[in-house]
Image (spheres, rainbow, N blue to C red):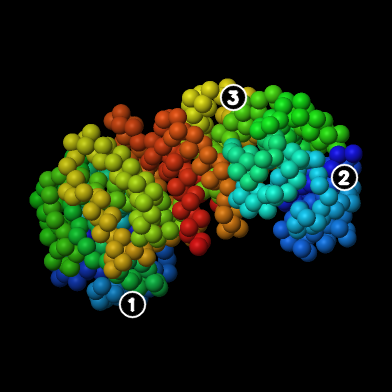
Amino acid sequence: VTRVCIAGAGAIGSLFAAHLARVADVSALVRREEHARALREHGLRISGRADFTAQLEAATAPDELAEPNLVIVACKGTDLDTVAAELAGHWPEATLMTVQNGIGADEVVARHGAWRLLTAVTFMSGTRHDDTHVEYVLDTATWIGPARGTTPDDARRVADLIVKSGLKAEAFDDLRPAQWSKLIFNATVNTVAALTGLPHDAHFAALGGVGDLGYLVRDLMDEGKAVAAAAGVPLREDPWEMNVLATQRGSAHYPSMLEDVEAHRPTEVDLITGALVREADRLGVPVPLHKTMLRLIKAKEDSWQ
Amino acid sequence: MKVCIVGCGAVGSLFAANLATLDDVEVWAYDLAREHVDAINRDGLRLTGAGEVTSRLRATSDASELPPCDFGIVATKAMHTASAIAATAHAFASGSVATVQNGIGNEEVLAEHVERVIRGTTFPAGKITAPGVVQWDVKGDTTFGPFEPQPAPFEAVQQLADACTRGGMPAQAVPDARGPQWRKVIFNAATNPLGALTGLTHGRVCEQPALRRLVTRLVDEGKAVAAAQGIVLDADPEELIDYAARIDVAYGHKASMLQDVEARRQTEVDYLNGGIANFGRALGVPTPTHESIWALVKGVEAAWQQ
């Protein structure tokens, strides 16, 4: 039997934990003791696109948990360094998989230990109602690829396990084309949403008058595409087409960065736009618009400090 | 002479109350805010703060009451220019109309409705604290000049500037008022929307090096658009930006656009960043940063409709 530890049980982590508990031994590593106790006592309830309650182990320190084969690091990008530091020195045989937005999450984790690593991006979404209840909202896939010390077969085995648990997943020999598509999409859509207060809706694809938001969205995506091209990464999907398609779905999505801004929490902008800008600078590709967005979001974070 | 202030908000009230102190000027005020109009007619228009003035003048929300006037001074928010001048144009059939509004493109709108137009830029600022009462926050100069495509005679421009100066609002008549106007619009467009988008005061926008560089990029794009029209700025907007950031000047000042955003009022971004972007497009000068900022602030406004 596979033993899986979910590090960070927010909406995404909880969705993984509860589903995987149906096909594996699952534990959750969380920050708050009361959260761990609630999970141990009441299990984890999923509503929405699925409806069940899973039983699982939970603790606030790795020492208190059985050694897993697989660790899904599902905390927010802003907590990644802290969570990885906490795992340092533990579970050397385990494979760690990052699912954070942006790029470079696996590199952050790599600094804290010699684990084998998988890298993933997830498009599923959920709403966390409380410590033991998460609503499964968007049943879109998690994409998984090899990183340090792993092979495409390792990625496939984890994808198979996730699919068996009732979630959607797909393995890639090279995740970068998919990851970069999402990076460019998120660097654009999340920052525009966070600065304007708009959910991801039809405004993002509007190409009417010159002041329309669609032009900015397209220009930001074009900058991102130029960086991907310079990095030698062929994109799996065109971010602008992803944008147009998503805005035609009818129900407007609230990107997490918009929720962070409204709650006056630090955003993941450094892992998303920041990562794109660092790659652009390394490759000598001008990205003035992304730099503008990065500065504005950082300044907005400063305004509530 | 008869002067009608079209749009008697904070800035319009500064002109109205000061001009009405002159014996040779009859001042009318046209404004749609009934409480403000009623208070002015009942108690006079009172300025407090940087200057203490109380003046009697005629205010109305009914444009048909306006007599033929020698001058109009349009001081509405920029998005109300067209409706305000359409309603009052009959009063200026043989007069000249000046704008003291923010942004660029206002003169063009006035010229669609009246014969003789005066370009104007003003720095004084204040806010309405109660109907009929305006707090005068900042004193400053006003520059008037003929609007080149459809100018008022220069003597008329001088006459208006002279009356304003005598009334306590120092004003200059110059043959080309575009320099001061573009300096101010560049200043406003480079700083106001950054405050509006981030929630930071003017001083805090300027003290962050990365954000300050963004201000400079906006300034540089604006300067390029001005230069392409042969406009010589009367001073570098950067100096004004640094001066305003001083703790003793406007460090803690929330730009009017930030105040608008906090109150969920439509902003003047179409006439600031939008104005620079539109002029840039017409002249073939790229203004990618102004276009981006414009789109973001329009997005903020659109989010209120959700």
Q: Secondary structure at mark 3?
A: loop
Left or right, residue A105 beside residue B140: right
Q: Secondary structure at mark 2?
A: strand
Seen in the picture, residue B133 relative to A26 is either above or below; the reply is: below
Cα separation, mark 2 vs mark 3, equals: 36 Å
Residue B41, position in %: x, y? Answer: 34, 72
Chain ID at mark 2? A
Which one is nearer the viewer's eye here, B160 or B218?
B218
Q: Which residue is painted at 71% across and 46% down in the image?
A: A74
Tell me the quarter of the picture where residue A93 sits: top right
Q: Which residue is painted at 72% across and 58% down in the image?
A: A31
Which residue in the protein does label 1 denote? B43
Q: Secondary structure at mark 1?
A: helix
Q: Residues within 10 Å of mark 2 (few under 14, many from 20)?
A: some
Q: Are the residues flagged by discs 1 and 3 from a single subunit?
A: no
Q: Is residue B268 visible?
A: no
Q: Is residue B238 visible?
A: yes
Type of residue at label 1?
Asp
Cα separation, mark 1 vs mark 3, equals: 69 Å
Q: Which residue is painted at 25% across and 46% down in the image?
A: B182
Q: Which residue is painted at 51% across and 31% down in the image?
A: A224
Residue A267, position in %: x, y? Answer: 57, 51
- Any mark on residue B271, and which? none
Chain ID at mark 1? B
Which residue in the protein does label 2 denote? A25
Which residue in the protein does label 3 denote? A235
Which one is nearer the viewer's eye here, A143 or B106?
A143
Type of residue at label 3?
Leu
Seen in the picture, residue A20 relative to B10 is either above or below; the reply is: above
